[in-house]
Amino acid sequence: MNLDVIQEKKILEVWNRTPDNPPGLKELTKEIHTAAERTKFMRAVFKGTMPANVWADYTYQKSIIYSSIEAVARDAGYTVDCLDVERSLKLYQDTKEMVGDN
């Protein structure tokens, strides 16, 4: 099943719920998470067959995404008590270690 179709289906289920019975994050993302785990990319990750250059690129891309999310969360004061939750710098350092200074 297409991830967009799964996501749309889940959103409709949420809209049809009453305020007395809100869904949890795990419940909302279960089907999407399962579908994502079945992608060619994630199967290669789980099997350890991901080419190093692809993994390095993926790690770098995550560092950029995480950096943006962390900046917004930090500016909004969401991470005041948990700055150790930030991972963008560690992801960037991992990328540098994988590819060198290029």
Image (cartoon, rainbow, N blue to C red):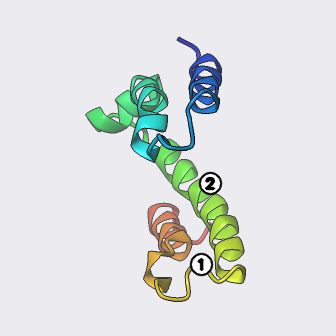
Q: Residue under circle 1? A: 78
Q: Secondary structure at mark 2?
A: helix
Q: Is residue 43 left or right of residue 86?
A: left
Q: Residue at x 49, y 29 (%)?
A: 32
Real-space Cα distance between discs 1 and 2?
Answer: 23 Å
Q: What's under tag 1, amino acid-wise? A: Tyr
Q: Residue at x 55, y 81 (%)?
A: 79
Circle 1 Cα neighbour tier, 10 Å, few/some/many (<14 / 14–19 / ≥20): few
Of 79 and 86, which appears nearest the observer? 79
Of 86 and 51, which appears nearest the observer? 86
Q: Is residue 36 left or right of residue 11?
A: left
Q: Secondary structure at mark 1?
A: loop
How many callouts does the rendering have? 2
Question: Which comes sooner in the sequence, label 1 or label 2?
Answer: 2
User: Does residue 75 lie above or below 67 as drawn?
Assistant: below
Q: Quadrant of residue 5?
A: top right
Q: Nearer the viewer, mark 1 or mark 2?
A: 1
Q: Residue furthest top?
A: 1
Q: Is residue 4 left or right of residue 41?
A: right
Q: Residue at x 59, y 78 (%)?
A: 78
User: Does residue 7 lie above or below 93 as drawn?
Assistant: above
Q: Residue furthest bottom?
A: 80
Of 92 and 35, which appears nearest the observer? 35
Q: Position of residue 87 (x, y in %)?
A: 49, 71
Circle 2 Cα neighbour tier, 10 Å, few/some/many (<14 / 14–19 / ≥20): some
Looking at the rendered image, the quarter that the C terminus falls into is bottom right
Q: Position of residue 51 (x, y in %)?
A: 43, 39
Q: Residue under circle 2? A: 61
Q: What's under tag 2, amino acid-wise? A: Gln
Q: Position of residue 21 (x, y in %)?
A: 47, 40
Residue 59: numbered disc: none
Q: Position of residue 68 (x, y in %)?
A: 70, 67
